[in-house]
Amino acid sequence: MQGAKVTEKPDRFEDGLRGKTLLESPELNKDTGFTLEERRVLGLEGLLPTAVETIDQHHQRVLQQLGQKPTDLERYIYLNQLADTNETLFYNVVMSNPAYYLPILYDPTIAEACLKFSHIYRRPKGMYISMKDRGHIQERLANWPDKNVRVICATSGGRILGLGDLGANGMGIPIGKLQLYTACAGVPPKGLLPIFIDFGTENSQALNDPLYIGLRQKRPPLDQVDPFVDEFVYAVQEEFKDCCIHFEDWRGTDALHYLARYREQVCCFNDDIQGTGSITVAGLVNAMRIAKQSLKDQTVLFFGAGSAGVGNAMMITAAMKLEGLSEDQARNRIWMFDINGLLEDSRIDLIPEQRLFSHKHAPSRDLVESINSIRPTILIGVSTVGKAFNQQVIRAMSEITERPVIFALSNPTERAECTPEEAFGWSDGRAIYAAGVQFPPVQIKGKMFLPGQANNFYIYPAIGFAVYATHAKRVTDEMFIEAARSTADAVTDEQRAQGLMFPPQSNVLESEVRTAVRVSTLIFDRNLAGIDRPSNVDAWLRSMVYKPEYKSLIG
Ligand code: NAI
């Protein structure tokens, strides 16, 4: 491998596990995949059935067992148990057919898995740090056996998907997100750590559930939470010297608050803000190619002004600036509408980040009225309100422009602001549509449309890989814009002609590795890498891509 290596601490995998302990290590277990020689040398004789099998045979067995599971939730539970016992086989299966497995491991199944997390719980994965650990967070982190933790995905469970505060049941999210780092971008799974930060929950159903696995208390006020999160962030810096924190599914205002607090201090990013912004920009790049227009000439209206809405608005501002607008000109083209109506200058309930996108306008609580007045060409739903884009909304958009861009990004599925049938049907097939979940192809007036899934899983695994590989010191918005462009470029003209704005899921690994190469190159260009630049970034990064194959453990 080229590029200077950072000295890494020895870890438990080099400790030489043997016998039963080796079989119980999900990272190293190969089950009947151990050769006779490995069984002899590693003390496994008598501990395994006689047959020596290949990973392909194991894969076939998994398919057979999976085929007997009646629901996606059962398949989710089965696959996660497989990950707990044989990680290589788990990734071998999942990476063989991402278009099939992503919806089981993540959207939409993850929503049900989180709602039932305390009930389907089998064994601990990752770490749980609670308010009761205050003053001792670093000691707790030191209990994690791997000292080379490179990416932590941390949630407080404050806003899980569109489902609100799920408390500790939200732990399904960081677990799933990090599995997608490997499944989608080939990031080696060793060194990825999901953490649930337990402040309690406002969710009374969870608090009253006898099987709930989290802290049974209401969330404390921000003045108690801030010092705790500070302690966590700085304990991570002390315990894991070279680690990026990926914040995920915090309550909207908390997400914005903590990103602003730490982004200049430590290596971190917020996927709901920056990842969502990036995938939306990727979709808009292709939407503009389809409509043969420029982003800088569009007017954008957001329905929902939480972390995803504000994150998107900020990223679109950055993208419009790269097309030549000033910051003010870009912001003036972006409007927002939330639960209290249009964001306009008389509103007194806005946080500073929302105020950037509130403009002079009469108050309005009516979306259609706001559309008719502002005349947006792009409407983006990040509200968690299913079916909010009704016929009047789509018709109003279709009267303003020939190719209205309608992105219904809320998830899970029932929270999508409209379906592809509705967007295409009510716009006479003129809408350029994307959703946050994968809808099946739609036929309108004899023409087949392929609804794209604007999901940040095209972005954050690639960003994570670039940060992991380059040992980046910071994560910047420019990296997310580069990831957006790279993702948009992975869609062919032919695919765009069918309405596709994001790469097909079947090709996700190649598209994300390319994105990781482009983002890594940018990190080196901006002197943000913690290692020397290799002579060939593409070959260097590809040499690190995780391959889910059984490797010999004896020399
Ligand atoms: P959030 O809770 O921070 O914000 C929700 C926003 O919607 C708030 O501004 C709220 O005022 C507004 N809202 C709620 N009810 C409304 C109503 N009846 N009318 C108008 N506005 C209303 O949530 P966040 O993080 O911004 O996420 C929003 C949605 O976007 C979620 O469903 C989430 O799963 C989805 N999302 C999708 C992503 C993707 O890649 N497709 C990525 C990130 C989030």
Image (cartoon, rainbow, N blue to C red):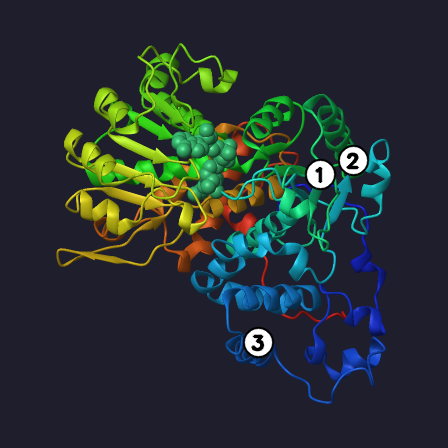
Q: Secondary structure at mark 1?
A: loop
Name the residue: 37% across, 18% down: 331
Residue 322 image-quadrant placement: top left
**Mark 3 vs mark 1: in front:** 1
Q: Is residue 537 visible?
A: no
Is 503 in front, or is 456? 456
Query: In the rendered picture of this protein, how many numbered marks are placed on residues?
Result: 3
In screen coordinates, is 407 left or right of 311?
Answer: left
In contact (CB < 8 Å): disc 3 and disc 1: no
What residue did someone put label 2 on? Answer: 131
Instruction: Inspect the image, locate mark 1, and give the three-letter code of the amino acid beneath it.
Output: Gly
Residue 481 image-quadrant placement: top left
Q: Is residue 484 above or below residue 358?
A: below
What residue did someone put label 3 on? Answer: 62
Q: Secondary structure at mark 3?
A: helix
In contact (CB < 8 Å): disc 1 and disc 2: yes
Is 535 in front, or is 18? 18
Disc with the residue nearer the chain's start (3 vs 1): 3
**Mark 3 vs mark 2: in front:** 2
In space, the residues marked 1 and 2 are separated at their CA atoms by 8 Å
Instruction: Inspect the image, locate mark 3, and give the three-letter code of the amino acid beneath it.
Output: Val
Is 360 in front, or is 268? 360
